[in-house]
C-alpha cells in the first residue's frame, strides 16, 4: 500500500462531527477503505503526540490545551478517528473547535502513522485449526500450501481493534485475499485467524462468522488476568508464522506479553 | 481474599453480573465501558449503605433471585421495585437493613423484564480488571454470579449505619420521552427517515440484555432507504442502531465496540437509566434536543446523585407489621407498579 500512501500525501482534510455528548468523530470520507487507515493512524499518532507534549511542556495557548485535560481516549476505526472526552470538563463545542483547529493547522497531514510494535504471531494453519483453508485454496485455485505461504508472507498492520476486546483487524494482505464472506455463519474459537475482504481478523472470543477460518493462534489476544490485558494495539505490524500443533502446545506466551507491556510503557511515557 | 463470605447465591436467573461504575477508556482496545446500567440506582445503594463510590453491586436480571445470609449482613435493593422478602416477610425496597445469619432473601421476578441491584454493606468483591469489578460476560471479565457462589465484602471492617434507613424519593413513573442527540452517522439517513423515526411511538420489547435493547414502532417495522451499510465504525453508549429487520436496537454498556450497521441517533447519558427502567411493552417517544439541553440534563442528574445523602431517612415502620390489606395489595401487584402503592411508603 506504500504507493497509494504516497499518492494521497498529504492527507485530505477529514470531516469533523460531534457525536452524542462526549465524542468528536473525525472521518476521512473521501478515502477508500484501502487507504483510509493510513490517514486515520497518522492523525491518531500526531494527536497523541500533541497531547503528550501538552502534558509536559507549557501548553497554554495551544489549540488543544482546553481539550487535553478532558480527553478520555482516541479510538481509530477503518475510516475515522473518534476522540472521547468528558463533557463535564469541556463543552462539546469547545472540544470540536479545538480539534478543528488542530486538524486545520495541518502539520499532521504530512506525517505517517507512528510505527507500533513489530510482531511475529505464531499460528497453526489448516486441519482442525483452519478448517476453511482447503475450501479457500480451492476457490483461489491454488494449493493450501501456497495460500499459507502468501498469507504468512504478508506484512500486516493492525488498523483497529473491534468486535470484542483485543480482536484485531489487519490490512496489508495481497489482493488475492479480497474474497467475499460466506453466507452461512459457523462458530469459531478464540484465537481464530479469519480472512475475507482483503483483511485478516485475529479473534479474541468465540463467535459465529462467515469469514474463512484458515488458522488459529495459540496466543490469547485478550487476557483479563494480565495487568496489561491487550496483546495488540492499533498501528502494530505483524507477520503470521506457521507452526505445528505440537509447537502451539508448547508455546510460551510470556515474551509476547512482555512486548505488549513494553509497547504500552513507551506509549504512556 | 481474607474477608469472610456474607451471602450465598441460592437461585438466580441468567444474565446477572457484578457491576460498579465501569471502566471507560479502553474502547481503543475493543473493550466498552460496562458498569451498572442504571447509574442512579447504583449510587442509591452506595449512599444507603455508606459504601465507597467504587463499590460493586449484584445486577440482577428480571427473574427471581434467592440468597442466603452466611453471617449477619446489611443489604439494600435498588432499581424498579419488586417484591422483597427475608424469611418470607416483606422488606422495604430502596432501604438498607440488616439480614440475620441464616436468613433467606428472596427478590421476586419483574414481569417488566428489568434489572435491579442488590448492594451489600462493604461492597461485593470480585476480580479487579483495568480498575473495575464490572463483569463483562462476553469478554470473560469478572465474577459470574451463579448458584453456590459466595459473596465477600471488599471492606471486612465496614461499619454499619446506626439504624436501618431508606431514601426519601418519589418512585418515578416510567419515562414517556427519551431525549436524543445526533450521532456520527445521523446524516447518512434521509431527512424523511429521521423525521419518521422521531414521529413514531415506540415500545420496549422483551429483547434486552447488557448489550442493548430492541424497540419496535407502533406503525410496524421501521424501514429506511436501502444501501446504508457502513464501514465498521465506533459505537457510542446509547447509539440507536438500525438493522435490516426494522426493530432498532439501543446499544448499552456492554455493546460491541465497533459495528457496521448505521446508527440514527444517540440517547443522551441522562436518559439511559430512564430507558432501562421501562417495562416491556411500555410506549414512549423520542425527542431530539440541543446540546445545551443534554448538558443541563446531565448536570441535573449529577446534582440529584450528589444530593442523595440528604434524602436518607430512618426506616421507622416495620413492614413485617403492615396491615393485611397493604400486604395483599403488595402481593397482587408484584413489582411492575407505581411506587406510591408500595406498603413501606404509607403513613
Image (cartoon, coloured by chain):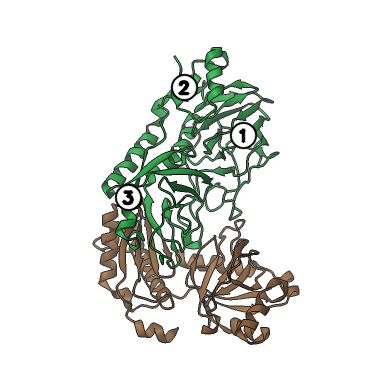
Chain colours: A brown, B green
Q: CA distance from mark 1 to mark 2?
A: 21 Å
Regarding mark 1 in the picture, which secondary structure is present there?
Answer: loop
Q: Is residue B98 above or below residue A113?
A: above
Regarding mark 2 in the picture, which secondary structure is present there?
Answer: helix
Along the horizontal axis of the image, is A226 left or right of A93?
Answer: right
Q: Residue furthest right?
A: A246
Q: Where residue A214 sits: x, y (%)?
A: 64, 75
Disc tally is 3
Indicate which label's residue lies in the foreground, 1 or 3: 1
Q: Residue at x 72, y 71 (%)?
A: A128
Q: Which residue is mark 1?
A: B64
Q: CA distance from mark 1 to mark 3?
A: 41 Å
Q: Where residue B138 sits: x, y (%)?
A: 59, 54
Q: Is residue A87 visible?
A: no
Name which of mark 1 and mark 2 comes first in the sequence: 1
- Can you tell which quarter of the image residue B89 is in? top right
Q: Nearer the viewer, residue B327 or A205?
A: B327
Q: CA distance from mark 2 to mark 3?
A: 41 Å
Q: Residue furthest front?
A: B219
Q: Which residue is mark 2?
A: B341
Q: Quadrant of the C terminus of chain B?
A: top left
Q: Chain of mark 3?
A: A
Q: Nearer the viewer, residue A182 or B200?
A: B200
Q: Nearer the viewer, residue B346 or B113?
A: B113
Amino acid at each position: 500500500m506504500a504507493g497509494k500512501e504516497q499518492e494521497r500525501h498529504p492527507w485530505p482534510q477529514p470531516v469533523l462531527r460531534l457525536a452524542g455528548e462526549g465524542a468528536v468523530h473525525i472521518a476521512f470520507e473521501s478515502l477508500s477503505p484501502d487507504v483510509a487507515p493510513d490517514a486515520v493512524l497518522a492523525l491518531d499518532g500526531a494527536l497523541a503526540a500533541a497531547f503528550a507534549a501538552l502534558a509536559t511542556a507549557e501548553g497554554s495557548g495551544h489549540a488543544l490545551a482546553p481539550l487535553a485535560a478532558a480527553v478520555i481516549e482516541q479510538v481509530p476505526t477503518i475510516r475515522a478517528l473518534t476522540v472521547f472526552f468528558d463533557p463535564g470538563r469541556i463543552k462539546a463545542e469547545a472540544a470540536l473547535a479545538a480539534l478543528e483547529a488542530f486538524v486545520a493547522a495541518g502539520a499532521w497531514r504530512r506525517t505517517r502513522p507512528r510505527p507500533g510494535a513489530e510482531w511475529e504471531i505464531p499460528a497453526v494453519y489448516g486441519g482442525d485449526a483452519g478448517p476453511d483453508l482447503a475450501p479457500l485454496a480451492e476457490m483461489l485455485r491454488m494449493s493450501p500450501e501456497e495460500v499459507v505461504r502468501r498469507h504468512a508472507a504478508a506484512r500486516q498492520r493492525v488498523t483497529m481493534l473491534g468486535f470484542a476486546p483485543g480482536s484485531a483487524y489487519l490490512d496489508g494482505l495481497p489482493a488475492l485475499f479480497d474474497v467475499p464472506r460466506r453466507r452461512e455463519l459457523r462458530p469459531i474459537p478464540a484465537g481464530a485467524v479469519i480472512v475475507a475482504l482483503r483483511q485478516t481478523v485475529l479473534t479474541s472470543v468465540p463467535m459465529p462468522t462467515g469469514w474463512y477460518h484458515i488458522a488459529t493462534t495459540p496466543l490469547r489476544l485478550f487476557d483479563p488476568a494480565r495487568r496489561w490485558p491487550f496483546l495488540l494495539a492499533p498501528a502494530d505490524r505483524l507477520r503470521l508464522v506457521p507452526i505445528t500443533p505440537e509447537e502451539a502446545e508448547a508455546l510460551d506466551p510470556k515474551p509476547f506479553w512482555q512486548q505488549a507491556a513494553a509497547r504500552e510503557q513507551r506509549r504512556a511515557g | 481474599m481474607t474477608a469472610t463470605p456474607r451471602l450465598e447465591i441460592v437461585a438466580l436467573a441468567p444474565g446477572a453480573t457484578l457491576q460498579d461504575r465501569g471502566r471507560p477508556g479502553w474502547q481503543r482496545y475493543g473493550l466498552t465501558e460496562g458498569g451498572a446500567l442504571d447509574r442512579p440506582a447504583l449510587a442509591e445503594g452506595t449512599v444507603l449503605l455508606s459504601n465507597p463510590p467504587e463499590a460493586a453491586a449484584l445486577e440482577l436480571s428480571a427473574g427471581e433471585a434467592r440468597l442466603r445470609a452466611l453471617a449477619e449482613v446489611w443489604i439494600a435493593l435498588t432499581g424498579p421495585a419488586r417484591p422483597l422478602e427475608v424469611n418470607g416477610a416483606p422488606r422495604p425496597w430502596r432501604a438498607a437493613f440488616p439480614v440475620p445469619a441464616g436468613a433467606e432473601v428472596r427478590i421476586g421476578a419483574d414481569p417488566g423484564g428489568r434489572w435491579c441491584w442488590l448492594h451489600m454493606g462493604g461492597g461485593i468483591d470480585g476480580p479487579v480488571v483495568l480498575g473495575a469489578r464490572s463483569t463483562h460476560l462476553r469478554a470473560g471479565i469478572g465474577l459470574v454470579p451463579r448458584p453456590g457462589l459466595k459473596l465477600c465484602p471488599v471492606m471486612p471492617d465496614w461499619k454499619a449505619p446506626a439504624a436501618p434507613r431508606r431514601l426519601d424519593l418519589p418512585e418515578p413513573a416510567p419515562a414517556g420521552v427519551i431525549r436524543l442527540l445526533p450521532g456520527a452517522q445521523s446524516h447518512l439517513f434521509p431527512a424523511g427517515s429521521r423525521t419518521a423515526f422521531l414521529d413514531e411511538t415506540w415500545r420496549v420489547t422483551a429483547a434486552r440484555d447488557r448489550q442493548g435493547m430492541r424497540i419496535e414502532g407502533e406503525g410496524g417495522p421501521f424501514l429506511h432507504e436501502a444501501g446504508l451499510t457502513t464501514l465498521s465504525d465506533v459505537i457510542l453508549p446509547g447509539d440507536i442502531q438500525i438493522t435490516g429487520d426494522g426493530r432498532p436496537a439501543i446499544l448499552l454498556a456492554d455493546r460491541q465496540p465497533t459495528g457496521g450497521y448505521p446508527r440514527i441517533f444517540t440517547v443522551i447519558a441522562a436518559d439511559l437509566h430512564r430507558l432501562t427502567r421501562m417495562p416491556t411493552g411500555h410506549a414512549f417517544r423520542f425527542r431530539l434536543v440541543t446540546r445545551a439541553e443534554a448538558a443541563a440534563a446531565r448536570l441535573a442528574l449529577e446534582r440529584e446523585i450528589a444530593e442523595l445523602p440528604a434524602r436518607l431517612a430512618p426506616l421507622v415502620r416495620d413492614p413485617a407489621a403492615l396491615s393485611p390489606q397493604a400486604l395483599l395489595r403488595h402481593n397482587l401487584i408484584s413489582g411492575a407498579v407505581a411506587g406510591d402503592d408500595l406498603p413501606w411508603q404509607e403513613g
